[in-house]
Image: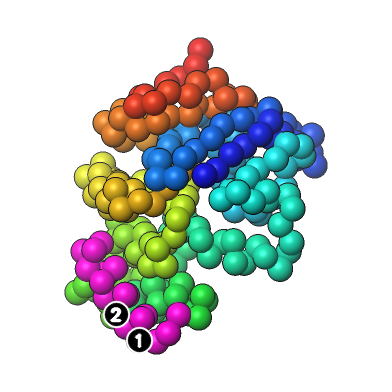
């Protein structure tokens, strides 16, 4: 379970990115965070990744307060998270197989397990035939599939996606969303920040809308909503 309790974030330049944000996400939920640029979506993701600290309030993940987490515990906490970004963030000097395997190497998975799981994940995202290719040899949609395979290979309890379909054509974006929804059906909690109105409207998941750092709407099976 993820819980934000009256979380506020004010950056050093004085910008209040989040104001008294409170919400709870149950295990296995799929939640969209929507809103215009600067609404606070990316701040929520950075807080969850513990890249930044809240100015006030508390964030609890899996029963643990992130504020109480020791620096040495952060890498282990992040191992339970799968993360997908709009810009893919693949390693350009490694082929596709090695990009996915790298995520398992970080957590010191046995080589036998890596050899078993990486092909399985590449198959799941439809890229078995591209295992020896390098990122610059793939289309944007294929690179995002690799990023998804890498995010899911360690069976994360939480998948965090920041505009994962932002640079993709509609058909490819739909394919990416199908893979993410499949992970959700298998029990992974999904948190996604997006501007993709068509995707949000079509999927009928929970939608939390932000405006100027304030949660203005939280609706089960909602659609994309622009607060006037």
| Dot label at residue 85 | none
Q: Which residue is mark 2?
A: 116
Q: Residues within 10 Å of mark 2 (few under 14, many from 20)?
A: few
Depth order, front residue of 225/111: 111
93 to the left or right of 146: right
**Residue 65 picture location, percent across and down:** 68, 48
At 35% from the left and 32% from the top, the residue drawn is: 205
Q: Is residue 67 visible?
A: yes
**At numbered mark 1, what does the secondary structure look like: helix, strand or loop?**
helix
> Mark 2 near mark 1, Cβ–Cβ under 8 Å?
yes
Depth order, front residue of 148/4: 4
**At numbered mark 2, what does the secondary structure look like: helix, strand or loop?**
helix
Q: Is residue 97 above or below residue 213?
A: below
The colour scheme used to paint the residues is rainbow
**Residue 4 picture location, percent across and down:** 62, 37
Q: Which residue is mark 1?
A: 112
Report the span colored magenta: 109-126
What is the CA distance from the residue labelled 2 to the residue labelled 1?
6 Å
Depth order, front residue of 147/136: 147
Q: Is residue 44 above or below residue 117?
A: above
């Amino acid at each position: 379970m993820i819980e934000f309790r009256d979380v506020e974030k004010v950056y050093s330049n004085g910008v209040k990115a989040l104001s008294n944000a409170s919400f709870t996400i149950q295990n296995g939920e799929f939640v969209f965070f929507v809103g215009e640029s600067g609404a606070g979506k990316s701040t929520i993701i950075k807080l969850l990744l513990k890249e930044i600290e809240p100015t006030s309030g508390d964030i609890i993940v899996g029963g643990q307060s992130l504020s109480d987490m020791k620096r040495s515990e952060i890498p282990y906490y992040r191992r339970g998270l799968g993360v997908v970004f709009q810009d893919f963030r693949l390693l350009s000097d490694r082929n596709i197989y090695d990009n996915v395997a790298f995520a398992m190497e970080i957590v010191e998975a046995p080589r036998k397990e890596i050899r078993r799981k990486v092909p399985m994940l590449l198959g799941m995202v439809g890229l078995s035939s591209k295992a020896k290719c390098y990122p610059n040899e793939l289309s944007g949609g294929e690179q995002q599939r690799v990023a998804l395979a890498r995010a899911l290979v360690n069976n994360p309890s939480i998948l965090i996606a920041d505009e994962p379909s932002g640079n993709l054509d509609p058909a490819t974006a739909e394919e990416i969303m199908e893979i993410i929804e499949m992970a959700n059906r298998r029990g992974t909690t999904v948190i996604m920040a997006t501007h993709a109105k068509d995707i949000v409207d079509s999927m009928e998941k929970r939608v939390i809308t932000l405006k100027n750092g304030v949660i203005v709407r939280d609706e089960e099976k909602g659609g994309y909503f622009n607060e006037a």
